[in-house]
Amino acid sequence: MSRTSKTEPKTEQVIDRILRTREEVEPSSGFVASVMARVHREASSPAAPPPLSFPWRQVVAAGLAGLGTALVLVLVLGGVLPNPMVGALEGVGRSGELPALLVRLAAALVVTWLATAVPRWLVS
């Protein structure tokens, strides 16, 4: 069952007494010296792993994919390449045209994703 009312004030008094005391916590006598010795040993050991290098291959691949995407966009907007979305919304009101439009949009998204993901996958 629940505690009696006689033990609750004692518990609170004990907790208050513990919290009021300022007992300093100090490490044992040899702890600091042993930790510092270990730190110096690890710092001077030749078995330390080499620093991580910057992922230049991934940066270059992502940059090339971005430049390629931008180039295609400029060529499409400039009229050099045919725009696959011209006329895509024509006839959407007719029955059966909306699913075809959604399929074309999904295909365009998949091609765009592949054009950016495959170069990054190849160099990683």
Image: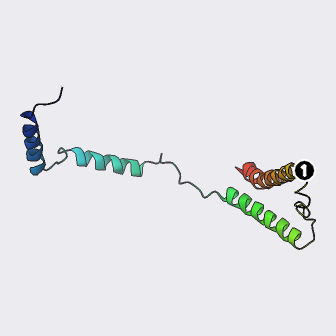
Q: Quadrant of the N terminus?
A: top left
Identify the residue at horizontal 10%, vertical 31% (top origin): 4
| SS category of the residue bearing label 1 | loop
Question: Is 9 placed left or right of 70 in the picture?
Answer: left
Quarter of the figure with residue 2: top left
Its colouring scheme is rainbow
Q: Residue at x 92, y 72 (%)?
A: 79
Could you say which is closer to the camera, residue 82 or residue 69?
Answer: 82
From this view, report whether residue 84 is shown above or below residue 26.
below
Indicate the amino acid at tag 1: Ser
Task: Indicate whether 4 appears above or below 97.
Answer: above
Could you say which is closer to the camera, residue 90 or residue 59? Answer: 90
- To which quarter of the image does residue 53 belong? bottom right
**Closest to the observer: 1 or 84?**
1
Position in image of residue 109 (x %, y %): 79, 54
Q: Provide the residue designation for mark 1.
A: 95
Residue 16 % position (x, y):
10, 46
Question: Residue 78 versus residue 60: which sits nearer the camera?
Answer: 78
Residue 66 percent across, percent down from the top left: 75, 63
Residue shown at 91% from the left, 54% from the top: 94
Numbered-mark total: 1
Mark 1 packing: few (<14 Cα in 10 Å), some, or many (20+)? few
Residue 23 visible at all: no
Name the outermost residue toward the top.
1
Q: Can residue 32 be seen in this view?
A: yes
Residue drawn at point x = 16 percent, y = 48 percent: 25
From the top left corner, tell me how far across and down residue 86 is, in percent. Answer: 90, 64
